[in-house]
Amino acid sequence: MKNLLTDVKGVRVGHADDPKLASGVTAILFDAPAVAAIDIRGGGPGVRDDAVLDPVNTVERIDALALSGGSAFGLDAGGGVQAWLAEQGRGFAVRDALIPIVPGAIIFDLLNGGDKAWGRFAPYRDLGYAAAAAADTDFKLGSVGAGLGATTANFKGGLGSASALTAGGITVAALAVVNAVGSVTVGDGPWFWAAPFEMNGEFGGRGLPTSFTPDMLAMRIKGGPAATAAENTTVSVVVTDAILTKSQAKRLAMMAQTGMARAIYPVHLPLDGDVVFAAATCEKPIEPLVELSALGMTAANVLARAIARGVYHATALPFAGALPAWQDRFGR
């Protein structure tokens, strides 16, 4: 176990980003099409092909997911991932045509200091293609891929991942791009809200403060009174090797949203676009009530850990006025 999304067999992750742009793309590829669903809790989401994930709709499985910076411009990233998959002969068959199924979601990172004057065509389709081509079982965390330009209320955001096994031996893993309107830390201190779920000191081992003051519990939101719904989103993916239907994958995504509430304060606001994709590679059977419940509980814990790891591993952007990274303040 590498404590990464790719601990689920048959999953690969690739990043492509541009330091000058201060933005990027992360592609999540499935070696075989995966059952998938989506749950949206934030008030300002930006998604691609979310309708195909509705349990009542026809297409059962997807080939990949595209997570991107760039706000609505970043939705082009899915086309780049789709193009790479088409070259590999992947896709949903409609007679002689193959159509790669690539849902996705975006974060807003247009005001982070990077050069977004890209002219007529945004770079995200090409970044999506490059991210798909780079996909592997090892990948970096922090300020990389779709997390390069991410921020939170008080510290630099980033991309995190974590994994676990259920008591029944089912693997579940998460990946999160943390661009939250709220804070992932308790106040402006070193403690992560997700601390009770931390494994092996994976985000510093600081635990929680011994007591809480009103200032620690005060609402910290990006932009303060000028905050808008367009500027914030945490997009995430949970993947398991359990055999699930689309309806069960939808329930898994809903249960995994609890992990956001454990790791981000506040969360699921009108000012967020929080999204959880859930995917299943369908290798191991599970009992549909108790075992599915245990899987959802574990997925929520894993997602909380992934969110904290995204901020823990982030590095500050090299622009005037950029938010500090957690490591700048509290790293050893």
Image (cartoon, grey):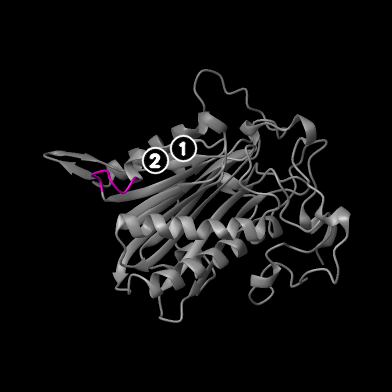
Disc 1 packing (10 Å; few <14; some 14–19; many ≥20): many
Counting the numbered discs, the total is 2
Percent of width and height locating residue 251: 41, 58
Q: Is residue 122 above or below residue 205?
A: above
**Which type of secondary structure does the marked residue at label 2 adopt?**
loop
Q: Residue shown at 56%/54% (left/top)?
A: 176
- Measure the alpha-carbon separation of dots 2 and 1: 6 Å
Tag of residue 47: 1
Q: Is residue 53 left or right of residue 95?
A: right
Q: Is residue 10 above or below residue 111?
A: below
Q: Residue shown at 27%/47% (left/top)?
A: 88
Residue ID for mark 2: 50
CB within 8 Å, label 2 to label 1: yes
Q: Quadrant of the C terminus?
A: bottom right
Q: Image quarter for residue 98?
A: top left
**Which type of secondary structure does the marked residue at label 1 adopt?**
strand
Q: Is residue 192 left or right of residue 82?
A: right
What span is in magenta? 54-59
Front residue (pair 21, 254) = 254
Dominant SS in magenta: loop
Q: Amino acid at mark 1?
A: Val
Q: Amino acid at mark 2?
A: Asp
Q: Residue shown at 25%/46% (left/top)?
A: 59
Residue 82 shows in this picture: yes
Front residue (pair 227, 17) = 227
Q: Is residue 286 left or right of residue 198?
A: left
Is 34 magenta? The answer is no
